[in-house]
Amino acid sequence: MRKYYRFIDGLRKFAKSRMEPDEALALARSLLQKRIAKREDNFLRLAERSIFQYSRSPYLPLLAAKRIAFGDLKAWVSKYGLEASLRTLEREGVYFTVDEFKGKVPVRRKGIKFVCEEGMFDNPYLSFVYEVRSGATRSAGTRIRIDFDYLHQRSLYDAFLLDLHGCLRAPIANWFPVFPGAPGINSSLRFAHIGNPAERWFSQVAEDQVRVNWEKRWGTKTIFAVHRLFGCPLAEPEYAGLNDAARIAQWASQALCEHSNCVIYTFAASAVRVCIAAAEANVSLKGARFLVTGEPLTPHKKREIESTGAVAIPVYGISEAGVIAAGCNQAHSQSDHCHLYKDTTAIISHQQVVPNFDLCLDSYLFTSLLYESPKILLNVGMGDFGDIDTEGCNCGFGELGFDTSLSNIRSYEKLTGEGVTFVDTDFIRIIEKDLPESFGGKSTDYQLIEEEDSKGFTHLQLLVSPRVGKVNESEVLARFMMLLKHGEASPESWAQSGIEMWQQSSMVRIRRDFPVCTASGKILPFQLGKRSNQLTKYATK
Ligand SMILES: [Zn+2]
C-alpha cells in the first residue's frame, strides 16, 4: 500500500508545484547554466554514491578487476576532463553493450564473467513513483521507473526548447498512443508542469485495443483525477488512427488562425502523415512546429514536413534517460542534427561488431550525470550509433554551452517504423524458425528488408525466396504479424499498440525475391535496404 500512497503523494506535489511558462523558462536557464558549470562535480558525486558506495552496483566488478578506485576517477576527471576519463574507463573494459545491459549475453572481460539483470541499473536513491515501458517489446522494453522530481527536471528542457523555437505559450497537441507507451503520458505531464498543458492528446490506438492491468489503469486514472483536482486538467486521449491524420492537420490549421505558432509532438512518420493530409486539403501549416521523436528524422521526412511551411525539430531520447538531445533553430546540413543536453548526459563512442548486420560501427555509450536519473548509466550502449561533433552554434543551446551535437543517429538493434520499435531478437526466431516451419524452406529463405519510400515512410519488406515454392502471401503476412503480437511480446506490453499501428500503416509487405547477402556473402535475417549505403562505411573488413 505504501507505494500507492507515495505515488499519490508525489503526484499531488507535482501537480501543485506546476509553474507558469516564464517561471519555468527562468528556472530552466539558471539551472542548466549551473549544471553545465558543475558538470564534472555532479558526475563524480553521482558516481561516488551510486556506484562506488553502492555494493550492488554492476559496475563494481569491472572497476575492481582493473583496480580503479573512486580517487583514480576523480584524479582523471580533474586532469583530463569528463569525456577523456570515460574513454579511459571504456579502454579498461568499464562499459556495457546493449546486449550485456539487457542480460541477453554475459559480460565477459578478462577474468570476469557475469550476467546483468534489468533492475541492477536502477537508481537506488529514487523513491519509486510510476512505471512505464520503453517503446519496444518485452525483450527490449526496459521497465523504467519515473520519479516526479525527475519529470520536473525534464520539463525544464521543454520550456527551454519551446522558447528557443518561439512557441513557449503556443497551443500544443500530442499524437502518441495511450498508456502504457511512455511519450504520451510523460509529455502531457511535463507540458502541464511548465504551464502550457497540451490542448489535445490524439492517440493512434484506441484505448480498447490495448489490454493493460488494473494497476496501470488505476495509475493513469489517478494522474488525470489529481490534475483535475488541482485545476489543471490534462487532455484525455482521443482516438485518431494513422489514416485520420487530417484531424490533427485540421487542429493545427485552426490553432494557426488564432496563434502565430502551434506545436505538434509526435513520431516522425506520424508528422509526415499530418503534412500529407494538410497538403491534400490545401492547408498551409506555416508556423507549426513538429517536435518529432521515436525514429530518425531522415532527410526525406524532414523535406516532406517542411514542404507545408512547418518546421521539423528532432527530439532524441532513450527510454533509460528520457530526452537527451534536441534540434535548434539554425540551419544544419544533417536533417537530424541535435544538441546534446550535456549537463545531464555524456556520450562517447565505442567500436563494436554487430553480428546481425555484419557490421563494425561506433556505437554510443551513455553516462548519466543527473541525480534523479532513473538508471545509473556509466558507459552503457543502447544499440544506437551515429556522429558526435563538438562545435559552436549561434543558438540558445550554443550560448548555454551545449556544444556537442549528435547526427545521423540510427539503431543497429531495433527496427523502427511509425515510431514503433521492435528489437531484432523478436524477429530472429520468426524469420529463422517459425516461418520455415510453417511455409517450408530454410532459415535463409526469409529476410526482412527495411526501406524508406519516396514520401519518407519506412516499410519492412518480408522477402520470401522463390525457392520456397507456392505460398499464400496473405497467410504468410498474417502469420508473421500474429507471431510478432503473441510471441515474445507480453499481453500488456507496448507491442500491442505497435502491431495495431503497423497494421494501420501496412508496414510489412511480402515480396517474392531471393534474400540479399552481405558484402562478405552471408545471408542475415535483416538487411537495412537504403540505409546499407550509409552503413557501408562501417562494414566489417
Ligand atoms: Zn544550435
Image (spheres, rainbow, N blue to C red):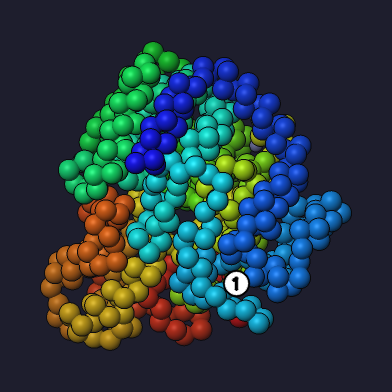
Give x and y (percent) for residue 541: 61, 80
Q: Residue at x 25, y 67 (%)?
A: 487
**Which element type, helix, strand or loop, lies under badge 1?**
strand
Q: Classify 529 as above or below 402.
A: below
User: Is residue 397 something one can see in this rendering?
Assistant: yes
Tally of numbered discs: 1
Q: Residue at x 40, y 82 (%)?
A: 523
Q: From the Cβ of disc 1, is ligand 1 less than 8 Å away?
A: no
Q: Residue at x 35, y 52 (%)?
A: 420
Q: Classify 218 as above or below 363.
A: above
Mark 1 is surrounded, within 10 Å at the Cα level, by few (under 14), some (14 to 19) or many (20 or more) other residues, namely few
Give x and y (percent) for residue 67: 76, 70
Q: Which residue is mark 1?
A: 352
Q: Which quarter holds ligand 1?
A: top right
Q: Residue at x 22, y 36 (%)?
A: 239
What amino acid type is highlighted by mark number 1? Gln
Relative placement, left or right, of 279 versus 90 is left
Q: Classify 386 as above or below 477.
A: above
Task: Return the residue found at the far front.
Answer: 1
Relative placement, left or right, of 47 versus 446 is right
Looking at this view, is 344 or 406 the one in front?
344
Answer with the quarter of the image where residue 450 lies. Answer: bottom left
User: Is residue 273 something one can see in this rendering?
Assistant: no
Looking at this view, is 289 or 80 the one in front?
80
Task: Return the residue found at the far top.
Answer: 258
Give x and y (percent) for residue 124: 55, 51
Give x and y (percent) for residue 251: 31, 25
- Quadrant containing the N terminus is top left
